[in-house]
Amino acid sequence: MNEKLANPAPLGLMGFGMTTVLLNIHNAGFFPIDAMVLAMGIFYGGIAQVIAGIMEYRKGNTFGLTAFTSYGLFWLTLVALLVMPKMGWADTSPAGFMAWYLFMWGLFTCFMFFGTLKANRALQFVFLSLTVLFWLLAIRDWTGSVAIGHLAGWEGIICGASAIYLAMAEVLNERCGKVVLPIGEPKAA
């Protein structure tokens, strides 16, 4: 039996993209972090991406499984890092230690970027811009620079928007049976 499975990537990309844009509106200096960002981090950035990752497993896509599950768990850990100290469950992580957390996520993302080199250009851009975002946020926390934090926020808005674009391109292109939003498909070897 050869059943057709739905593409879970748009769900994961949209969960990542929308949550990333909203958090980075904060990082750019426009709004404080509030319940809306935390809820998005738990449910859409977190749980929805984990679900998408599990669905990628079913399709045999190791890259999608690793990416969506990992970034879903990133969002859940980030919310926990912000909320647990407020609930008295743990001490707040010092900025320098948070920088290492962000740096390690940037390193993971950099390696994942290399896994996109035979994929479409839009996916490559998402992973490259996410690598830059994580490292800018790490530098912000190491240096305490508000300007670098705001720059990271703007870069993060672009990164998140690129994931939203790719998600919508995959949905609309499949639904319409033609390229509605181009994603820079790789040339056949």
Image: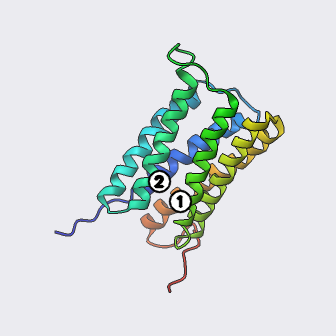
Foreground: 12 or 84? 84
Give coordinates of residue 22: x percent, y percent.
Answer: 63, 38
Residue indicated by mark 2: 67
Amino acid type, label 2: Ala
Q: Please report the residue visible at 52 percent of the width from the left and 73 percent of the height from the top.
A: 118
Give coordinates of residue 42: x percent, y percent.
Answer: 48, 33
Mark 1 Cα-neighbour bin, 10 Å: few <14, some 14–19, many ≥20: some
Q: Please report the residue visible at 70 percent of the width from the left and 38 percent of the height from the top.
A: 25
Give coordinates of residue 80: x percent, y percent.
Answer: 51, 27
Give coordinates of residue 188: x percent, y percent.
Answer: 50, 84
Q: Please report the residue visible at 61 percent of the width from the left and 22 percent of the height from the top.
A: 92
Quarter holding the N terminus is bottom left
In the image, residue 113 sits, relative to residue 26, either above or below, namely below
Could you tell me if residue 164 is visible in this image? no
Amino acid type, label 1: Met
Residue indicated by mark 1: 112
Name the residue at the bottom extreme: 189
Q: Are marks 2 and 1 in contact (CB under 8 Å)?
A: yes
